[in-house]
Image (cartoon, rainbow, N blue to C red):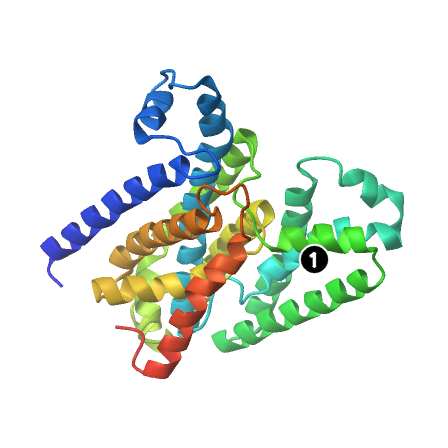
Amino acid sequence: MKQTNYIKHFILLLVLLVVLFFTNISLGSVSIPFKDIFTTLIGGIPHKESWETIILTFRLPKAITAVLVGSGLSICGLLMQTLFRNPLAGPFVLGISSGASLGVALLILGSSIFGGFLLNASISNWSLPIAASLGAFLVLSAVIIAANKVRNTMSILIIGLMFGSLTSAIISVLAYFSEAAQIQQYLFWSFGSLGNLSWNEISVFAIIYLIGIVGTISVIKPLNSFLLGENYAKSLGINIKRSRNIILLITSILTGVITAFSGPIAFVGLAVPHIARMLFTTSNHKILIPSTAIIGAIVLLICDAIAQLPTSEFTLPINAITSLFGAPIVIWLLIRKKRIFV
């Protein structure tokens, strides 16, 4: 594809992203016109004063969260698919999300076993993100240690899957000894949510997200070389071990913070990198990273708009919608049996 075509694609995607961003803010149990959204965002007063609170307190934070989560998960999926050269690798293959889920499970379900300390800790608004972050950090540490012990990259993938199975088993044991109300609370968290973050939480989220993006940009050259194998990467002077650890660290940080603040959201990170490759027909990560990020944000904004059930007060679990979107794409990729990496 020519450079001019890349630019056209990016412009169209960015326009679509902006339109969907404002559409997402306008939808809900109360429909708000675009004009009033623009007025509110530039500091004016909309036709109804209540709309200002709805926009600034609830819908704008949710739309920003959707952009951060969608783009972050998609970039993580791209990194994992490139590192492992596996089209079905996603951001959760390292077990980081399972570690975050274990942290939340210990907080919510563990009170039945560990007593009132955890029950009292769960009162804080920051308790779930902190618990999830600690769980993700523990698994991240284990994965990094394992990565330095093995030479084969595929072994790291298997180790990550084993960590995921181990944490799932522990969660099952905790759930067995828990009460119905605690299991329900954990289940609702596992559905994923984009609408529960305050501006303070979004600020922390955005800072960690930007650190991950800067790290991703720094490994573009190793990512491109990994597509042709580790021996080729070595011939270019790439430090395989160092680059692999940086990629694992970036993916773990982004996946961990996303899971901590929004819960485990499936399939976006798995499906979106393939959409970007098919749309731009390139394997160059200078093109794939920004395109994957933009498409991921677009996809999650669309999924969130569907989940909101416009004109209804009910909201479907975002995880259900993303799975309904992602699963057919993965099935289609398997059926086609064509070469995934361009």
Q: In which image quadrant can residue 331 be found?
A: bottom left
Query: Residue 90: where, in percent of width, then height?
Result: 47, 66
Query: Residue 284: where, in percent of width, then height?
Result: 25, 63
Q: Is residue 239 visible?
A: no
Q: Quadrant of the N terminus?
A: bottom left
Label 1 secondary element: helix
Q: Quadrant of the C terminus?
A: bottom left
Q: Is residue 285 above or below residue 31?
A: below
Query: Residue 324: where, in percent of width, then height?
Result: 46, 64
Does 41 sit left or right of 95 as displayed?
A: left
Q: Is residue 23 above or below residue 326?
A: above
Q: Is residue 180 visible?
A: yes
Q: Is residue 231 above or below residue 246?
A: below
Query: Residue 12: where, in percent of width, then height?
Result: 20, 48
Please name the residue shown 59% across and 72% down the image: 161
Label 1 sits on residue: 102
Nearest the eye: 332 or 245? 332
Does 133 sit left or right of 81 as displayed?
A: right
Nearest the eye: 19 or 8? 19
Q: In which image quadrant can residue 117 be found?
A: top right
Image label count: 1
Please name the residue shown 19% across and 53% down the image: 9
Please name the residue shown 50% across and 77% down the image: 154
Nearest the eye: 45 or 7? 45
Check disc 1 and give the amino acid type: Leu
Please name the residue shown 35% across and 63% down the image: 273
The crowd level at tag 1 (other Cα within 10 Å; few <14, some 14-19, many 20+) is many
